[in-house]
Amino acid sequence: ELLALLPEKLQADFRVLIQHDQIPAAHLELIKAADKISAYLKCQSELKAGNREFETAAEQLALKIAESQQPEVIFFMQVFVPSCKLTLDGLMKTY
């Protein structure tokens, strides 16, 4: 168990961070959504680099993310993701 590797004084503080039964359900949903968004952005990065092997994964992840009704996910996808798809020149023009 990972907790046993920590000094005893730190174990209680870290327990709530790594034991899923201690994490509120709403937080777990956000963590899962963040994982999907991270994977989607990785796919977009690979596609931008010319690696077409990530097309299907990007499409599937985009669909799963689009199904989300979480306001945080919708906000992130609308506000931050478009800038992740820009080229360096595009970023410089935007800011």
Image (cartoon, rainbow, N blue to C red):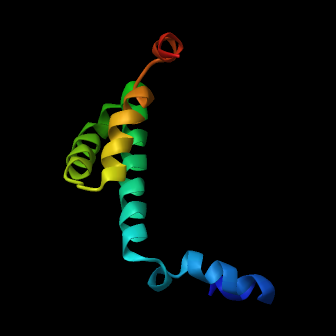
In the image, taking residue 18 as reference, residue 41 lies left or right, namely left
Q: Is residue 15 visible?
A: yes
Is 52 positioned to the left or the right of 87 in the image? left
Q: Quadrant of the N terminus?
A: bottom right
Picture residue at 47% right of the left edge, 80% below the top: 20
Residue at horizontal 43 percent and vertical 27 percent from the top: 83
Horizontal relation, residue 69 to residue 87: left or right: left
Q: In the drawing, does residue 42 fall left or right of residue 62?
A: right
- x and y percentages locating residue 63 in the rendered image: 20, 47
In the image shown, does 47 or 83 lie closer to the viewer?
83
State the image quarter where residue 81 is shown: top left
11 up-or-down from 30: above or below: below
Instruction: Measuring from the top left, give residue 42's x and y in whole percent.
Output: 43, 41
- Compared to 69, does 77 lie above or below? above
Q: Is residue 26 above or below residue 81?
A: below
Who's the residue at 58% across and 80% down the image?
Answer: 16
Q: Position of residue 36 (x, y in %)?
A: 36, 53
The image shows residue 39 at horizontal and vertical percentages of 39, 48
